[in-house]
Image (cartoon, rainbow, N blue to C red):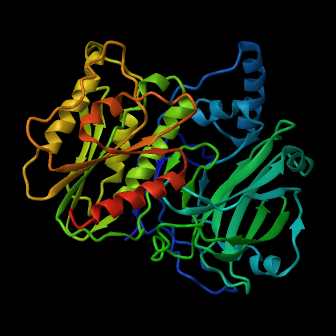
């Protein structure tokens, strides 16, 4: 069963804004299907989303005022309240508007001659540009094929100030048969856009190695103009892949139901990886992500966002380890608040919504008097918490996988390395993100040193794949 949780930190929808979160099981069907003459509309059930803003560094005041005026003009064109979302301020620095790519389950494909358009030649009633990037491995160990459709504001303005756009994306085999039902994104434009701005429909496809035809349709219900474009793409196998069968049980292609490639406001959790562990000894594996963003980068919003996204992706991947004998648990630590905001002993059905709430709760900028008073004991809190988990009774070999960014605690903090009073029948692994070239100091490493952990620096998704392979080989050794 595939379970996907979507969290929208700030939504920009012209039609409506959802205000709560939910988990959706098995979104629109992804089973292979031949190209129908009259495609059935996708199911009407949609995930709902929630959001919260965060602070964005702003440019100097004069440049900011000029850009805000231009942004306000663009927001007015899309019918968006400028106070609605942090995405608006984030995109002040960018000459484009990229809406959240939410599938529109209400649009009936039978209302347009889609098959006639697809059987005809490429068309561009509204000038646009299609960009498809090379397939890339993600930190959650899936292959994604990114694409962007770019429509200049001038092209839209020439055909009128108002537009009712439907962007439709599908993927076929070389014979024209559909792999999945198309994804449809609806975007209204209320008034003329500022010059020099582009409207982007930016998304991705999850794909297994193979040859595909990606097709794109843009339909303007206001002017009846339409665009059609097709691109043949090749997705190659990973070179020297330690997990060549990891995605064997996944569909050939999948389209994300809800995504935000440009804004980064959507976090998705995906199941279905094949990661068997043929361990001979019973294992008690505990995933221990440090949810708190690194204190030394608290003012760098890009680093904080990367920390959250990568933590979610790595925990998502590790949760899919399939032990021959044993259990996997998850303990999320908020070291800044000396708290455990998320704990689940059995990961057969993971509460991803609760985990994501805990992850973003650890990211809050609110600092209490208690936090200030305990700021120099953060290292001691982590050390003591880990020590308690390592000595829990039981016959199984304890395996703790710490997932963190490099952490530099306040000057004068207690950084005495962890010392256990009794022998630790355990294995400790440390998966550590490296966010930039200056990310070289880590107090977590100092605290873990007496346990002789295996530390893996995760700079790219390939680093995660190699770390995963080594951890599995280690757990499968006869002595374990």
Quadrant holding the C terminus: bottom left
Quadrant of residue 364 in the image?
A: top left
Q: Is residue 365 above or below residue 209?
A: above
Q: In this orientation, which residue lies closer to the viewer: 435 or 437?
A: 437
Left of 342 or right of it: where is 221?
right
Q: How many callouts does the rendering have?
A: 0
Which residue does the image show at 41% across and 61% down from the upper left?
469
**Is residue 315 shown to the viewer in this render?**
yes
Q: Is residue 449 above or below residue 299?
A: below
The image position of residue 201, as x and y in percent, is 71, 53
The image position of residue 219, as x and y in percent, is 78, 63
Quadrant of residue 218 in the image?
A: bottom right
Q: Residue furthest right?
A: 158
Quadrant holding the N terminus: bottom left
Which residue does the image show at 51% across and 67% down from the upper left?
44
Quadrant of residue 381 in the image?
A: top left
Q: In this orientation, which residue lies closer to the viewer: 290 or 26?
A: 290
Left of 349 or right of it: where is 80?
right
Q: Is residue 175 above or below residue 235?
A: below
Q: Is residue 381 above or below residue 410?
A: below
Which residue does the image show at 71% across and 13% down from the upper left?
61
The image position of residue 82, as x and y in percent, is 64, 31
The image position of residue 235, as x and y in percent, is 66, 70
**Is residue 23 shown to the viewer in this render?**
no
Q: In this orientation, which residue lies closer to the viewer: 170 or 427?
A: 427
Which residue does the image show at 58% across and 26% down from the upper left?
56
């Amino acid at each position: 069963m595939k379970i996907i949780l979507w969290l929208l930190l700030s939504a920009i929808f012209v039609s409506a804004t959802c205000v709560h979160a939910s988990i959706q099981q098995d979104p629109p069907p992804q089973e292979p299907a031949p190209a129908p003459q009259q495609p059935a509309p996708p199911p009407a059930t949609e995930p709902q989303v929630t959001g919260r803003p965060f602070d964005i560094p702003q440019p100097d005041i004069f440049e900011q005022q000029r850009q805000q005026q231009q942004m306000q003009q663009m927001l007015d064109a899309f019918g968006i309240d400028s106070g609605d979302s942090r995405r608006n301020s984030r995109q002040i620095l960018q000459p484009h508007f990229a809406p959240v790519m939410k599938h529109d389950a209400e649009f009936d494909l039978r209302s347009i001659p889609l098959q006639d358009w697809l059987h005809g030649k490429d068309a561009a009633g509204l000038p646009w540009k299609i960009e498809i990037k090379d397939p890339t491995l993600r930190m959650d160990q899936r292959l994604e094929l990114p694409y962007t459709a770019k429509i200049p504001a001038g092209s839209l303005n020439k055909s009128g100030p108002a537009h009712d756009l439907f962007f439709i994306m599908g993927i076929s085999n070389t014979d024209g048969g559909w792999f999945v039902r198309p994804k449809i994104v609806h975007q209204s434009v209320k008034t003329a856009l500022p010059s020099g701005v582009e409207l982007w429909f930016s998304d991705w496809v999850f794909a297994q190695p193979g040859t595909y035809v990606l097709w794109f349709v843009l339909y303007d219900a206001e002017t009846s103009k339409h665009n059609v474009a097709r691109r043949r793409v090749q997705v190659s196998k990973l070179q020297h892949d330690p997990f060549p069968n990891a995605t064997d049980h996944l569909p050939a292609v999948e389209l994300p139901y809800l995504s935000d490639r440009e804004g980064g406001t959507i976090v998705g959790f995906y199941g279905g990886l094949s990661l068997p562990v043929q361990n001979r000894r019973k294992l008690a594996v505990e995933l221990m992500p440090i949810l708190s963003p690194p204190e030394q980068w608290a003012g760098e919003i890009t680093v904080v966002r990367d920390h959250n996204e990568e933590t979610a992706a790595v925990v998502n991947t590790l949760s899919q380890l399939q032990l021959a004998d044993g259990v996997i648990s998850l303990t999320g630590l908020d070291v800044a608040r000396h708290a455990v905001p998320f704990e689940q002993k059995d990961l057969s059905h993971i509460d991803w919504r609760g985990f994501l709430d805990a992850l973003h709760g650890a990211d809050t900028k609110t600092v209490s008097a208690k936090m200030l008073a305990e700021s120099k004991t953060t290292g001691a809190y982590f050390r003591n918490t880990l020590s308690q988990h390592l000595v829990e009774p039981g016959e199984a070999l304890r395996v703790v996988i710490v997932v963190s960014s490099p952490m530099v605690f306040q000057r004068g903090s207690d950084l005495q390395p962890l010392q256990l009073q009794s022998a630790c029948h355990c294995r400790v692994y440390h998966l550590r993100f490296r966010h930039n070239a200056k990310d070289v100091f880590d107090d977590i490493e100092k605290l873990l040193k007496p346990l002789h952990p295996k530390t893996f620096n995760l700079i790219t998704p390939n680093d995660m794949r190699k770390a995963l392979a080594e951890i599995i080989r280690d757990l499968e050794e006869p002595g374990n």
